[in-house]
Image (cartoon, grey):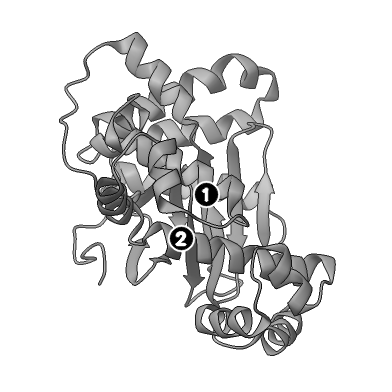
Amino acid sequence: MSSLDHFQAPLDAEMEKQRAELAAIIRRYTTDDGNYETAVGSLFMAKHSKSHDFAPVLAQPALCIMAQGRKEVRLADEYFNYDPLHYLVVSVSMPLSGRIVNVTSEEPILSVRLDIDPAEISALIADAGPLGVPTRPTGRGLYVERVDSAMLDAVLRLARLLDTPKDIAMLAPLIRREILYRLLRSPQGHRLYEIAIANSQSHRISQAIQWLNGNYEQPLRIDDLAKEVNLSVSTLHHRFKAMTAMSPLQYQKQLRLQEARRLMLAEGLEASAAGYRVGYESPSQFSREYSRLFGAPPLRDLARLRLSV
């Protein structure tokens, strides 16, 4: 399934001007293909001129804005597309896969990512008082929303600060706060709001996700995890799947396999050692589940990855 319909009105003249300026700034600060840190600590820029298939990653909470091109993100069996008309928000850390198609060196993907600290959302809510954000049932921990001129303008102003470094310390926190405020006031702002409110079920599910991220190599006992976040087992299962499209066990499996792949690729571990490091006791089970996620057993997958670099 896809998260949005692309047959929508294009950007108006003013927003197209904003998009073009943001694309120009990204080009200036991304000489080659890759992901770049910037002097604005939580702001990252990316340029990609080669297509690639789905590449798994443990995504952190963030706002992703596309200045040029289109990207498809997969969560379990669901697909989310974003482009200059739409932004993507990841509200909780989760394993995702992304792919890029139909790009060239003349028309590369140009994008920015602004990391989101849930504690900042909580502080903003505390300072601003009631924001009129409706409470709704837990939805997915990521979503796509139509971009508007106010959001694009705020992101552009944050990117412009790279040209005036002396202004970053004073102005970047203010613009970040404005962007978070606009996210909360957007049609799907309740997804961020619920996660930031202490003791809400969404907040407790985000705590369960944090626990799994830090303890994925440990045996998973659902009863213990439910107690850890003060939820019943049935509520944990239901809410967790509503937010991540996976059960806690499936989520843990993706974390383990992604980390094992990183260990083999970056640290040169053999498949059996990597599987054991992330919590697998059976090499055959590790190889079977690895093949199911990455489309090939470990040795063949790594050979393919190294050829593509």
Residue occupying the point 35% across, 64% down? 81
Q: Relative to residue 107, is residue 2 drawn left or right?
A: left
Is 81 drawn above or below residue 160 in the view shown?
below
- For the N terminus, the quadrant is bottom left
- For the C terminus, the quadrant is bottom right
- Residue 63 seen from this side: no
Instruction: Name the spot of residue 23 as percent of width and height, x first.
Output: 52, 51
Instruction: Name the spot of residue 199 as percent of width and height, x first.
Output: 32, 26
- Residue 266 seen from this side: yes
What secondary structure is found at the residue carrying circle 1? helix
Q: Relative to residue 122, is residue 22 drawn left or right?
A: right
Is 273 drawn above or below residue 178 in the view shown?
below
Instruction: Name the spot of residue 38 as percent of width and height, x first.
Output: 67, 39
The image's mark for residue 237 is none
Residue toward you, 184 or 302: 302
Residue occupying the point 58% across, 70% down? 106
Quadrant of the rendered image containing residue 168: top right
Is 261 drawn above or below residue 156 in the view shown?
below
The residue indicated by pointer 2 is: 251
Quadrant of the rendered image containing residue 299: bottom right
Tell me the kind of residue under disc 2: Tyr
Tell me the kind of residue under disc 1: Leu
Residue toward you, 21 or 133: 133
Residue occupying the point 74% across, 70% down? 274
> How far is the residue under mark 2 from the one under mark 1?
8 Å
Q: How many marks?
A: 2
Which comes before the other along the chain, label 2 or label 1? 1
What secondary structure is found at the residue carrying circle 2? helix
The image's mark for residue 212 is 1
Q: Mark 2 and mark 1 in contact? Answer it, CB < 8 Å.
A: yes
